Image: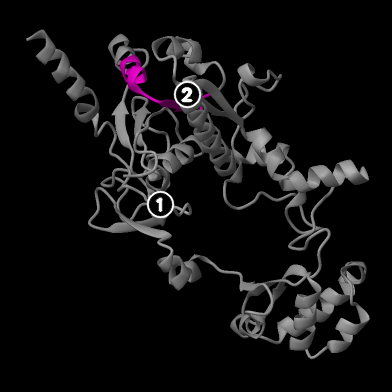
């Protein structure tokens, strides 16, 4: 029994931001009913597959963020399907959708309509530019994806090498961070409802979320009047805080504290640097020359050797790829790789586990992602049986 096992979530989301939000809720025990358009979520067919895309029900993209949910295929243009949806809303705690602003209203299924059916409903939306209910802007109704949000929110301008172009962060943080914030908003609304009995509308915009994530650039601009730009792997106000190339890879060193700086200098057999640059301000002022000193030292070492030299004395780590992650005992000990069935193959696959750890109600993925419309009878059939029994 998860911490949210008392909650029923109607999930109208697709692709990444919305499904990741409802996945977090499902991992914590919520009953998440994924309502899919005819043909299903757009990313069911996205690769990779284990072996045969024709035989397997879906690819890794869908599997990863839809685990532990139940699936029901509905067409909102169909009156019967629309009524089935409204009947589910009457018993639901939360509805989550990530359509463009105005889409649900086209079917007369917007927040106000659903609120009439269920006054305590928490209705949550994830959009590129938010919903007019919480602040109207000229951008609403425009489509948005992770790349758009990262570009507008300032993430790309401060990511990458100084001499290189603006660069997207590898993971889809425009989706994932927005989804996480939306999940927090939903849980806050649940708590408010517990105290007051009131439902409400929760809205998180991808653009807003990326602006929030670039908080450092925002205050820097406000304080200095200059727009921050790319600095590679370094930090604007801390040194050393960077990645250094070794003989066989890269390692990161975060030694901006004086105690850590002294340890790095000792490991390099360069106590003179500790004496010559004793304060953080000194080191920041001469960062380019000092970086060259550390880089020359690191280049003569293998990554493992560098890490072992500093580990336990200085914050240090190798730059890992997924091969390294799959071999890391920490990952296994923390149950951060979870095996699930891959329908249509004879294999199991591993997906990322839940990073939220709790002692009494530990979150965990509750099985594979659903087949399209897999739970129709389970979700709607039981209600039909009740109605039939009542008529008898």
Q: Which residues are magenta?
A: 85-99
Residue 214 lies left or right of residue 89; in this view the side is: right
Instruction: Please report contact status of discs 1 and 2: CB closer than 8 Å, yes or no.
Output: no
* Residue at point 80%, 84% (across, down): 265
Q: Is residue 90 magenta?
A: yes
Q: Quadrant of residue 33?
A: top left
* Residue at point 20%, 20% (across, down): 383
Crowding at label 1, few (<14), some or many (≥20) Cα neighbours within 10 Å?
few
Q: Nearer the viewer, mark 1 or mark 2?
A: 2
> Vertical placement of 21 versus 93: above or below?
below
Which quadrant is home to the C terminus?
Answer: top left
Q: Which residue is labeled 1 in the image?
A: 48
Expressed as whole percent of the image width and height from the top left, the position of residue 104 reads 48, 16
Expressed as whole percent of the image width and height from the top left, the position of residue 234 reads 77, 63
Expressed as whole percent of the image width and height from the top left, the position of residue 72 reads 30, 28
Closer to the camera, 385 or 259?
259
Q: Which residue is labeled 2 in the image?
A: 122
* Residue at point 43%, 63% (across, down): 334
Extreme residue toward the bottom, this view: 269
> Vertical placement of 21 versus 132: above or below?
below
Residue 301 lies left or right of residue 269; in this view the side is: left
Closer to the camera, 94 or 297?
94
SS under mark 1? loop
> Vertical placement of 332 versus 376: above or below?
below
Extreme residue toward the left, this view: 392
């Amino acid at each position: 029994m998860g911490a949210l096992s008392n909650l029923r979530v109607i999930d109208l989301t697709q692709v990444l931001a919305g499904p990741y939000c409802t996945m977090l809720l499902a991992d914590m025990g919520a009953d998440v009913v994924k309502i899919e358009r005819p043909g299903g979520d757009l990313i069911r067919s996205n690769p990779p597959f284990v072996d045969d895309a024709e035989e397997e029900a879906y690819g890794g993209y869908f599997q990863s963020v839809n685990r532990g949910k139940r699936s029901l295929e509905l067409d909102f243009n169909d009156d019967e399907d629309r009524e089935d949806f409204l009947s589910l809303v009457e018993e639901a705690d939360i509805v989550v959708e990530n359509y463009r602003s105005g889409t649900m209203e086209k079917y007369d299924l917007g927040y106000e309509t659903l609120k009439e059916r269920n006054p305590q409903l928490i209705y949550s939306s994830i959009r590129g530019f938010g919903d007019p209910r919480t602040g109207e802007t000229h951008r609403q109704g425009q489509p948005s994806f992770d790349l758009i949000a990262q570009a507008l929110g300032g993430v790309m301008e401060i990511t990458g090498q100084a001499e290189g172009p603006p660069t997207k962060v590898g993971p889809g943080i425009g989706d994932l961070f927005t989804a996480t914030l939306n999940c927090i908003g939903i849980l806050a609304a649940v708590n408010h409802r517990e105290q007051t009995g009131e439902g409400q509308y929760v809205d998180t915009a991808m653009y807003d979320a990326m602006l929030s994530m670039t908080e450092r650039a925002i205050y820097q601009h406000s304080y200095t009047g200059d727009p921050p730009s790319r600095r590679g792997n370094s930090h604007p106000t801390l040194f050393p805080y960077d990645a250094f190339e070794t003989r066989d890879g890269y390692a990161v060193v975060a030694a901006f504290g004086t105690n850590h700086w002294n340890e790095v200098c000792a490991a390099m057999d360069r106590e003179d640097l500790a004496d010559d640059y004793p304060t953080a301000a000194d080191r920041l002022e001469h960062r380019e020359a000092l970086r060259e000193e550390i880089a020359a030292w690191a280049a003569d070492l293998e990554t493992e050797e560098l890490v072992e030299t500093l580990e336990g004395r200085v914050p240090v780590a190798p730059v890992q790829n997924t091969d390294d992650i799959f071999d890391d005992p920490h990952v296994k000990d923390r149950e951060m790789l979870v095996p699930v069935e891959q329908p249509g193959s004879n294999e199991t696959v591993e997906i990322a586990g839940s990073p939220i750890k709790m002692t009494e109600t530990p979150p965990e993925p509750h099985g594979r992602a659903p087949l399209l419309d897999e739970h129709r009878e389970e979700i709607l059939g039981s209600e039909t049986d009740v109605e039939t029994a009542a008529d008898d």
